[in-house]
Amino acid sequence: MNDTFNLQRRQVLLGSAGAVASASLFGFSPLSLAAEMPLPDYVNWKHPEALIVHSANTLETRREAIGTSIVTSNEQLFVRNNLPTPDASIVADRDAWAVSFQGVKNPRSMTLGELKSLDVATVASVLQCSGNGRAFFPHGASGTQWSVGAAGCVVWSGVPVGAVVDALGGLDDGAQYMTSTGGEVLPAGLEPKTVVVERSVPLRALDQAILAWELNGEPLPLAHGGPLRLVVPGYYGVNNIKYVKQVAFTVGQTDAKIQASGYRIRPVGQGGAPDQPSMWEMNVKSWITQPLHQAKAGRVRIQGVAFGGARAVKGIEVSLDGGKDWQMARFVGPELGPYAWRPFVLFVELKPGSYSIASRATDAQGAMQPEGRLDNERGYGHNGWRDHAVSLVVV
Amino acid sequence: MNDTFNLQRRQVLLGSAGAVASASLFGFSPLSLAAEMPLPDYVNWKHPEALIVHSANTLETRREAIGTSIVTSNEQLFVRNNLPTPDASIVADRDAWAVSFQGVKNPRSMTLGELKSLDVATVASVLQCSGNGRAFFPHGASGTQWSVGAAGCVVWSGVPVGAVVDALGGLDDGAQYMTSTGGEVLPAGLEPKTVVVERSVPLRALDQAILAWELNGEPLPLAHGGPLRLVVPGYYGVNNIKYVKQVAFTVGQTDAKIQASGYRIRPVGQGGAPDQPSMWEMNVKSWITQPLHQAKAGRVRIQGVAFGGARAVKGIEVSLDGGKDWQMARFVGPELGPYAWRPFVLFVELKPGSYSIASRATDAQGAMQPEGRLDNERGYGHNGWRDHAVSLVVV
């Protein structure tokens, strides 16, 4: 792996603009190291050429690996685990996996086999880490330096959580949140509340939440939360609890650290607290996936992906001059529902020169991607179009 | 691998009814052998637990591996090659792959790189071998004994062939067929016309045909025709030419054997001839995927897939008593366009006993799956619901 390749990787990872902006923030070495890290064992079935291995628990889909055929394959899908992946024995007998339901009239445990006989729903949704785009924050937000590839669009099958609630007699009075707990083995010697993956989302999420056992036509892989994962379409990744072992309807939010102080939008330099906005519904976003660096003069295809987050995406524009002028691009392929992303294309005639290519999506309620970012301590929720633009050299 | 497992495999392969019906036709040994064949090298990335290896060139998706999340993953997708797969060197520089276009005003070769700059379309379609269901023909049709798994629903991206025709000045006068040629290396010592994969489809297929380079979000794998494949949504698999190296618009159909006498609907015992119906547009079809053998008394989820072939599927019914009574089932998930299949489910309360579970789909023009099959020499185009029924024991 030569330096030219690493330089290209940096540009891919950050987008050309980001690469320049952040060159002073950190050297080549962390990314060069990442480039040479092999796939961890538990995801050795993934496609290494499509992924950037940041660490054993964080793998990013390369920007140029995202195509136009809507779905992100399991083999290309990013991975972000808050804790080590459980032992593979938990997927040996998938239907035996048990989930405890609390905060309903008739609380009890149900096996996956039972859940499968209740109801089934299939939904396409964007799975996106809260920190996707963190690499573009100039203050050096701590955490994995994701560019755009901590996101993918996948198809899930599972049982609507609402159907389970109905089967268990309905919600307890006063329930305001759905609080779900992951089945990871907690590291010894630490206070469980500081490490457990337990998240609360508002009850409105019940409209679309499912307990999913299938991903893109496959039994849900262990690395992605199999045998059973809570999927909250339109919500950031952290709310989609892997190896879900409990779903409780609660009056308040959990006091687990990952909820109480973690995944909060807070000013740079401030600590996290429960009164700050939690990373729940995603916002409207898009980015260019090709071309990223160079193109030949003549007719050029510009492509990317756009989604509305918690609402459908409605429109997509592309700028060739860094945001001065915009033109409508075209969505391609079938619409897979409000939570899926849509690939887009624009064909343009380009003369030799330098271009700053940006994309800007609008959701079904008219909300448009902002130009800038909302600076925040942990670098969450970045959907500003300027940082996501790419610098293209046409020769 | 024990006998019980092999017996289950037989039942999966044929459906319970088929297993009984065909028990006298062939012994266990061919299938038992198949069960123990490893994946061939060129598809060693596929998921062996989801596939039945009939031969190096024919791999079937297990009936119960087809889920409800619409897409069939590349790792589970069936394989049927008429010739050995070309050397992997042809996907080393994908954009350099060249296709010759003939029968247009300005015939010439174009590289995949050029094609990508012309236009792009994304389409979900059922890919199905003409011989899917062959195992159910009682006359012992020669060829791979496919049950239901020589089919999958996938998402393609590529350039509309119509856009290429436009770019090359339009069609030659008198063109009636699109005749496309695969880039496989032909076996030495044989008359090329007897082995070349070259198929003609009627010009009406231009409405939806694309030259595809992407499959389910991945660069089109070599095993599935990469770097470039002609995809004719709604048409049987054989018309979807892998490694396509020429697309010609012709007055007549090719005289290649695979077209002239192959893939024709002909009476049992008769030879193939150009005046017999060719395996072009697919017809309406469905099948149950779960449960296949046993279920516990109580609430049972019956699921399957249904598609209209060349038209959208509109309705799906399920019978629990071998076709006496029918009830509407429910499609799940987003509709991915007229050429995709739709997963369906029906939840029923079942008492202990034996059931013959059948499904029957209706397309957008009201055409319904027939009860029987059209017996034909090669066992093509089977969409009769009775042979596809499963015998379920509820305990």
Image (cartoon, coloured by chain):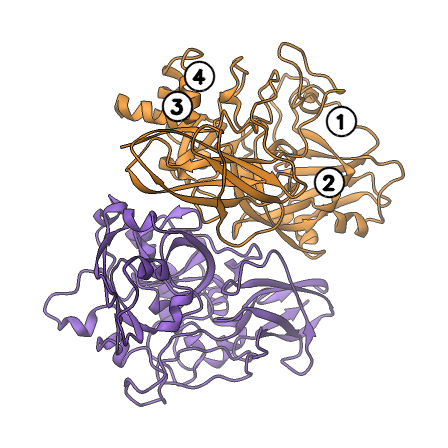
Chain colours: A orange, B purple
Q: Which of A223 and B251 is in front in this view?
A: B251
Mark 4 to mark 1 CA distance (whole Å): 38 Å
Chain letter of mark 1 equals: A
Nearer the observer: mark 2 or 4; the answer is 4
Do marks 2 and 3 share a subunit? Answer: yes
Nearer the observer: mark 4 or 3; the answer is 4
Where residue A254 is drawn, which disc sits there?
Answer: 1
Do marks 4 and 3 share a subunit? Answer: yes
The N terminus of chain A, quarter of image: top left
Mark 1 residue type: Thr
Mark 4 residue type: Ala
Q: Name the residue under label 4.
A: A21
Mark 3 residue type: Ala
Do marks 2 and 1 share a subunit? Answer: yes
> What is the residue that sits farthest to the left in this orientation?
B189
Dot 1: few (<14), some (14–19), or many (≥20) neighbours within 10 Å? many
Q: Mark 2 points at which residue?
A: A205
| SS label for mark 4 | helix
Dot 2: few (<14), some (14–19), or many (≥20) neighbours within 10 Å? many
Q: Mark 3 points at which residue?
A: A34
Q: Which of B301 and B5 is in front in this view?
A: B301
The structure residue drawn at horizontal position 64% and vertical position 73%, both measured from the top left corner, is: B317
Chain letter of mark 3 equals: A
Mark 2 residue type: Ala
